[in-house]
Image: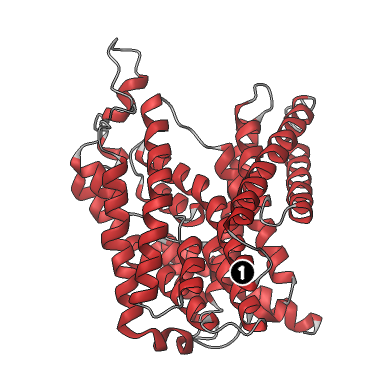
Amino acid sequence: MTPERLGLLWGITVFAGAGARLLAVLTGLPGVVLLLLSGLLIGRSGLGLVEPLDLGQGLEIIVGLLVSLVLFDGGLNLRLPGDTIKATVLRISLIRLVVSLSSVLLAAHWLAGLGWSVAAVYSAIVLATGPTVVTPLVQQIRLASPLGDVLEAEGLVLEPIGAVLALLLLELLLGDLHGWKELAFGLLARLGGGVIIGLFAGWILSEALRRVRSEDSVGIRLQITIGVLFLLYGVCEWLLPESGLPASVAAGVVVGRRPATGADKLDQLIRELAQLAITMLFPLLAADVSWGELSPLGWGGVTCVLVLMLVVRPVAVSLATIGLPLDLRQRLFLGWLAPRGIVTAAVASLFSIRLEQAGVLGAGRLQGLVFLTILMTVGIQGLTAQPLAKAFGLLALEKQEDPLEQDNSEDTNQSLPVFTDSG
């Protein structure tokens, strides 16, 4: 690709994303839905102005660095007050890890026609609800706390796990790994290694930020943060592929919780950069969608995604919230909102290329089914999230008392029950 063509690609992509953001402000429609539509318009399914694969190997690097910024922002702002909220996030994450992986595997094979191995990769790719989609939705609809915190935290926990697990399943499928023992060891090594490196990098960064005390030093703080974050991601990917995602979350959590780091001053700038990253990435990756990859899936693919949305997610959330102080409205909303985002799209695109190069049947169907999942979850759930939250009385503007927040209140001596082994 010539430099002129590359510049045009980025110019069209960023302009399309900015236009979608503006349209969202003017119309009140969910921004993530419009970003997705803008990518379809400029990409292979529309005008054909943008071809992400023209970026070559640079696509993976660009996506990884920008996604690490989004996840760092999520870790920086992660707030889980009260043991009940922590228990909710932990239980939803663990139960979804088991229920979703097995159920989606069966649905992808029986309904969408994927082979067992490719179906397993698909189930891991779509495991996580994307923070890149959930966070803008939660902010736009003004969802009452702490439901927004629970949804964002769930995505931050499962996004790295799903990406790492999908990579290991892909390596198992391609013969780079031998047996489930190697897969389990690889999962623990990459997640654990990423978290450990991320905690250390977060401590180093927080110590550096503590020594920059001047009120007019926000720009320096931002530069130091971005430098450490991108170096962290690069080192992690060099040592343990896909470990950069959990490392970014861990580093953000450390910086956000250490005193005297000025994280509150960084918050707005990092959030704006994260939003810019989403504005760039969503149209770019959506531009890779081809109707030719979606049409062969037929009603089987649509039914597979509907099962994931209407059966698998609600069942997993219902099981996870048994015994927790959530009313029916909150459980229904948590069981409904689970859009997939940028990491899901990026992983699908890159894995599809590797499968095609290895001559594995079903690579195109895998990418098509993943993008169909993104289209349906973002489109349907993005458009219905605010009306549903309003109908259930879950908007922050209504200022209703939330039972999950009572366990952190200073006005009462009673605490809500926390999940125990006895339920």
Front-lying residue, 3 or 356:
356
Residue 190 position in % (x across, y down): 66, 49
Q: Quadrant of residue 321?
A: top left
- How is the rendered protein coloured? secondary structure
Residue type at mark 1: give it: Val
Front-lying residue, 71 or 390:
71
Residue 384 position in % (x across, y down): 28, 60
Label 1 environment density (alpha carbons within 10 Å; few <14, some 14–19, many ≥20): many
Q: Where's the N terminus, which quadrant?
A: bottom right
Residue drawn 31% across the image and 39% down it: 396
Front-lying residue, 331 or 221:
331
Residue drawn 24% across the image and 55% down it: 387
Residue 68 position in % (x across, y down): 65, 52
- Element under disc 1: helix
For label 1, the residue is: 14
Residue 158 position in % (x across, y down): 50, 49
Front-lying residue, 162 or 78:
162
Q: Where's the C terminus, which quadrant?
A: top left
